[in-house]
Amino acid sequence: MQLTKEQQEILGGSQGEVMAKVYKTLVMYGDAFGADKLVPITSKYNHLVTSFGLKMIGPVYELMNKLIEAGALSTQKFSMDPRPIDSKVPANFLQNLIFKKFMYSKQDFYEGQLEQLGLMDKDAFTCACYMDEVGNKPARGDILSWAESSAVVYANSVLGARCNRNSGIIDIMGSVAGVVPNFGLLTDEGRRADWIVKIETTKKPEAQLLGSAIGMKVMDAVPYIYGLDKWLGEELDDAACTYLKDFGAATASNGAVGLYHVDGLTPEAKDFGTSLINEGAEVYVIDDAELERVKASYPVMWKNPDAKPKLCFMGCPHMSLEQLKSWTDRVEAALAEAGNSKVQIPTVFTAAPAVLREFEKTDYAERLKRTGVITSYICPLMYMNNPLSAKMPVITSSNKLRTYTTAKYYTDDEILAAISGKGGNK
Amino acid sequence: MKQFKGRVVAPGKITAEAVVTHNGFNTLASLQKALQFGDKKATVGDQNNPDLYGKAIAGKALCLPQTIGSTTGGMVIYCACSMKRQPACMLFSKPIDSLAAAGAILASVWLDDVTMPVVDSLGDEFLEYMKDGMTVSVDEDGTVTVD
């Protein structure tokens, strides 16, 4: 890797031992992937994935302390992934005890460290930091040092920013140094497609199911997708962005996709079209039967596969304002059809604190509250990641949550049927 | 005896007993329980990985194609190394993924008393040849010798 004279000096210790280690980390990381140089981060804000004060990650706190004590702080303010605890989310006595006294007992301490390192503000905790209400929305072409997989794939694909699928801690190393190694999705070559995906379904495919199918097929490659503009239109309006948010998160968690192009819709596909596709790209055709096959392949992790669900999570990744509003309408309609006034399964809709604040200003908030649905800023993944919650029969429309936990995937319509009581449990 | 040659990602020399997965190694799902509950043997808790579920990997030569799963993966490897619950070495048949590379590099740079050699690009034949319990030696130049 070619380093500038200044970068070589920092690597040699001109700004102290800790800063030298930050640079050494980034140089070794870049060397592992054939990076040619370190390039400046150009986004206004960073976003970090490790948001949870888990007792078990003591070594991370020690590392953060080394940075803070050496004055090696982030050159950018940053947002964080969601908080792991919210008292609004139903939990029994034992779960609360485990969350607060055992698992996340270091949360306050860790948030104190984050404030010293450069946290945007005390409410900047969401996986969907790119929402307008949150304000961490990179511009096209911006170079990022993010790690949250759903945010990385959104920033690359929908916003046209440039970011690799980094690991936690590498994200903060980049923003302390102000540079990241130039490889992979930061380069024009790395953004070319090795897969052509043709959507040939008879109805608009479920975003989370379609993303899952593509992720499992292409893994970490870049897919160029035909036929989705038919269902989403040719403008990145709120509805299209919301769809792509959920779709992308599923591609990134069920596979390892960091960038996709949608013909006629996403920015680079609009500008460069099929010239983005590499010669010899493989082809994957998705029709109704293929989506059914993928859905049927999901293992059911519940001890009793026919158990009545005890909890429903929507919002992994966090819901948009448009989504909260449209789901208020859908829940009301489903309840009316079922002849019920409140949801029949405890149901939690999760969104960024800033999005929830805007939602509260609308009349939808009171209407949703009347249905019994709870709104929260929690990370459902962090709620589920313990033996007690893992034993609960939880349903979700999130294919990310399904992949990483014991939660069972339902389509949007199945979720509505289950929580309204019109369809019962499947 | 059989030898394979790979690329050195994190240097080191070690001999250990092999434990093998043909599926992607989901770092968070595999190690979370072990780190959370003080299991020094690092027993793998990922129920989706029949090759490794219930097996101890601390101090073993972990042979794998790539890591998969949450982008906290590198942080988890770093924590495992810091707590001395890491594999003796990680031997990848494929080019290393960005999450595993991050974990190995963070441990190599930031932890003074931990060595976990990491070699990648050993080839599909390597993973086909390896079986649990084989003795593996890793050299500084990325040569992997199987007895």
Image (cartoon, helix red, strand yellow):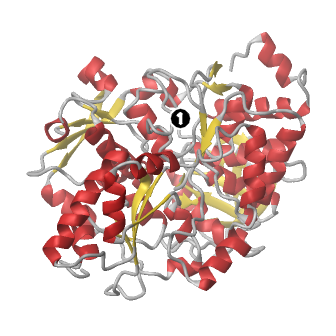
Rendering coords of residue B132 (x, y %): 62, 71
Q: What secondary structure is marked by label 1? A: loop
Rendering coords of residue B137 (x, y %): 75, 56
Q: Dot 1 falls on which chain?
A: A
Task: Say whether residue A217 is left or right of residue A173.
Answer: left
- The residue that appears at 12% across and 46% down in the rendered structure is A200
The residue pinned by badge 1 equals A164
Quadrant holding the C terminus of chain A: bottom left
Task: Say whether residue A48 is left or right of residue A117.
Answer: left
- The residue that appears at 61% across and 34% down in the rendered structure is A46
Q: Quadrant of residue A316?
A: bottom left
- Looking at the picture, which amino acid does disc 1 mark? Asn
Q: Can residue B5 be seen by looking at this rendering?
A: no
Rendering coords of residue A232 (x, y %): 20, 39
- The answer to which of A207 and A256 lies nearer the viewer is A207
Figure disc tally: 1
Residue at the left extreme of this rendering: A202
Rendering coords of residue A231 (x, y %): 16, 41
Q: Quadrant of residue B96?
A: top right
- A94 versus A201 height, above or below: below
- The answer to which of A240 and B12 lies nearer the viewer is A240
Task: Say whether residue A230 is left or right of residue A380.
Answer: left
- The residue that appears at 33% across and 68% down in the rendered structure is A370
Q: Residues within 10 Å of mark 1 (few under 14, many from 20)?
A: many
Q: Can residue A68 be seen by looking at this rendering?
A: yes
